[in-house]
Amino acid sequence: MVLWRLLASTAIILIAADTGSAQNCSLKETPKVGDCFRTHIEMTLKGEIRVSAEGKPTTIPLEAHAEHDFPERILALNPKGIPEKSARLYETAKATIKAGPDRTERSLPADRRLQVAQRHNDQALVYAPAGALTR
């Protein structure tokens, strides 16, 4: 009998209690011209390349590490408020690739650190005002 009273009391409290309504909160950013952001990207890869040499399968160990670090400023927005043009000043832009005994290091030349990222008709274009981006 006591158990039934306890269960009934609990059920009445749960039914009578206000469940409360959820509140909405938008986390969408509204960028403005002149806003600045800092971006840091790192990538590490470890694996192997499988090739066939003289009819025998061979594996070559592969390791890579890349890092980009740059502040970015919005220069222009499209009518929908989406960034259309921004300038980046790369403080770090380097990659190291090791495939077997071979090791390659690439980095962005100092005169190409300033880059502009631009969107035109949903096509991305990145260029350095100082000159061409070449290997």
Image: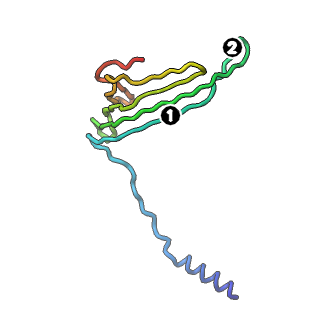
Front-lying residue, 129 or 1: 129
Amino acid tagged 1:
Met
The crowding category of the residue bearing disc 1, from other C-alpha atoms within 10 Å (few below 14, some 14 to 19, many at least 20), is few
Q: Residue at x 35, y 31 (%)?
A: 90
The crowding category of the residue bearing disc 2, from other C-alpha atoms within 10 Å (few below 14, some 14 to 19, many at least 20), is few
Where is residue 52 shown, x and y percent of the image?
69, 16
Q: Which residue is drawn at 57% across and 81% down?
A: 12
34, above or below 89, in the image: below
Residue 69 as seen in the image, left or right of residue 47: left
The secondary element bearing badge 1 is classed as strand
List the single residue furthest toward the bottom. 1
Asked which quadrant contains residue 74, the reply is top left
Where is residue 38 shown, x and y percent of the image?
36, 40
Where is residue 39 shown, x and y percent of the image?
39, 38
Front-lying residue, 19 or 88: 88
Disc ID at residue 92: none
Q: Where does label 2 land, which residue? A: 53
10, above or below 36, in the image: below
Front-lying residue, 110 or 14: 110
List the single residue furthest toward the front. 101
The secondary element bearing badge 2 is classed as strand
**Total number of numbered labels?**
2
113, above or below 57, in the image: below
Q: Where does label 1 land, which residue? A: 43
